[in-house]
């Protein structure tokens, strides 16, 4: 599976070059490819889901696996540009509580502090 990657500060934006359904074999290929991108990284990875038409449990599993690897290295994985259908899957599975989701990669790149730091700052104000 081909992925488009571009460096952005201390992170990387990962996008799909064409429309894809993240299920079955495509999920396995994505999982292998995203692990290559992550290899040893500790920064932020932004997965741009704009061209993902559909995602099933194997696609969700690939994203969760990547998130766990990055967090164990001190990094993070965030998502952007979800279609309504993909967002519904994340809502039903309650994975919106696990992943940070942004409208687009540029919004995700602008975020530098962790969600807990943001919450703590907001509470003090």
Image (tube, grey):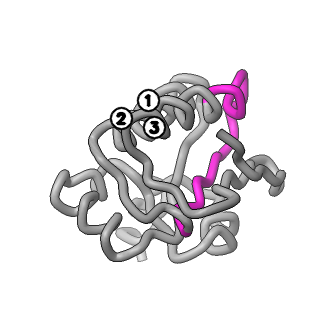
Give the image location of residue 82, x and y in percent. Answer: 44, 69
Circles 1, 2 touching at the beta carbon (< 8 Å): yes
As measured in the structure, the alpha-carbon distance from the residue carrying label 1 to the one carrying label 2 is 6 Å
Left or right relative to 39: residue 26: left
Asked whether the residues under the numbered discs 1 and 3 touch, taking CB atoms below 8 Å apart as contact, a structural biologist would say no
Q: Position of residue 113 (x, y in %)?
A: 59, 57
Does dot 1 land on a helix, a strand or a loop?
Answer: helix
Q: Kindly indicate whether the residue at mark 2 contacts the one at mark 3 (C-beta within 8 angstroms).
A: yes
Residue behind mark 3: 27
Could you say where residue 74 lies in the image, as x and y percent from the top left?
59, 30
What residue sits 45% from the left and 56% below the top? 115
Is 85 placed above or below 72 here? below
Instruction: Kindly identify which numbered label has been placed on residue 65.
Output: 1
Q: How many marks are shown on the rendered structure?
A: 3
Q: Estimate the spatial distance between the alpha carbons at disc 1 and disc 3, rounded to whole Å.
A: 11 Å
Q: Neighbour class for label 2 at 10 Å: few (<14), some, many (≥20)?
A: some
Closest to the observer: 54 or 47? Answer: 54
Q: Write the start and end of the magenta stretch as one range.
A: 35-50
N-term-proximal mark, 3 vs 2: 3
Quadrant containing the C terminus is bottom left
Q: Which residue is mark 2?
A: 61
Q: Is residue 24 rendered to the left or right of residue 117?
A: left
Residue for point 54% across, 45% down? 77
**Position of the N terminus by quadrant:** top right
- Give the alpha-carbon distance from disc 3 to disc 2, as whole Å: 8 Å
Q: Is residue 100 magenta?
A: no
């Amino acid at each position: 599976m081909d992925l488009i990657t571009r460096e952005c500060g201390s992170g990387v934006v990962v996008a799909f070059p064409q429309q894809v359904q993240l299920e079955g074999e495509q999920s396995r290929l994505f999982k292998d490819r995203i692990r290559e991108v992550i290899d040893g990284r500790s920064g932020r990875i932004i997965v741009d889901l704009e061209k993902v038409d559909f995602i099933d449990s194997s696609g969700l599993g690939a994203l969760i696996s990547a998130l766990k690897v990055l967090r164990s290295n001190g990094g993070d994985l965030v998502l952007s540009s979800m279609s309504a259908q993909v967002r519904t899957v994340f809502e039903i599975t309650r994975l919106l509580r696990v992943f940070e989701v942004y409208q687009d990669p540029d919004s995700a790149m602008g975020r530098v502090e962790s969600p807990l730091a943001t919450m703590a700052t907001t509470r003090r104000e």
